[in-house]
Image (cartoon, rainbow, N blue to C red):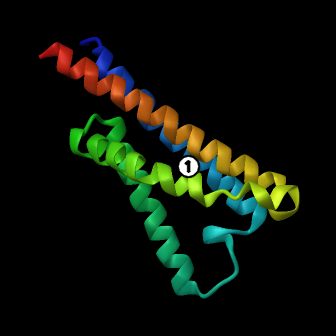
Amino acid sequence: MTPYSLSQKYDTLAGATLVLSFVLNRVFDALTHRGVFADGPAAYKLGMFLALLAILAYYYCIGQGRRWAQWLFLGLVVVGIPVVLLGFRPELGPVGYAPVHVLAYVLKYAGQGIGAFFIVLSLRQAKDQR
């Protein structure tokens, strides 16, 4: 049995972190009746379910060390940073956002940030191994 390289360990940590963040947010969606758990037509729920499966498959590719998936994720993180920073409106205060929504928001982006950190470590380690 061959030992994992450090790059493969970072790949696995990145995938696991992203999946954990994903699962936690689906739990929050279930608790607050949002996303696929929201009331709506069956076609909407089916579309949401298929999108969620695609996201899980994408995170699996990241965990397996697929470089295209990792570079795409990092690109989306860079593009998404302004959206995240501008999307949260603190002027609404505690009245505008329920605590569970704030917690879900923080956990989602913290998990994605940690996943991006592991991807960067993996890419650097893979570059050093060449």
Q: Residue furthest left?
A: 130
**Amino acid residing under circle 1:** Phe
Note whether residue 98 is visible.
Answer: no
> At which x and y percent is residue 48?
51, 72
The residue positioned 36% from the left and 36% from the top of the image is 63
The residue positioned 26% from the left and 18% from the top of the image is 125
> At which x and y percent is residue 129?
17, 14
Residue 14 appears in which quarter of the rendering?
Answer: top left
- Against 79, residue 32 (above or below) is below
> At which x and y percent is residue 84?
55, 53
> At which x and y percent is residue 114?
51, 32
Q: Residue beneath label 1, please? A: 22
The residue positioned 29% from the left and 48% from the top of the image is 72
- Against 17, residue 44 (above or below) is below
Q: Is residue 38 left or right of residue 119?
A: right
The residue positioned 35% from the left and 23% from the top of the image is 121
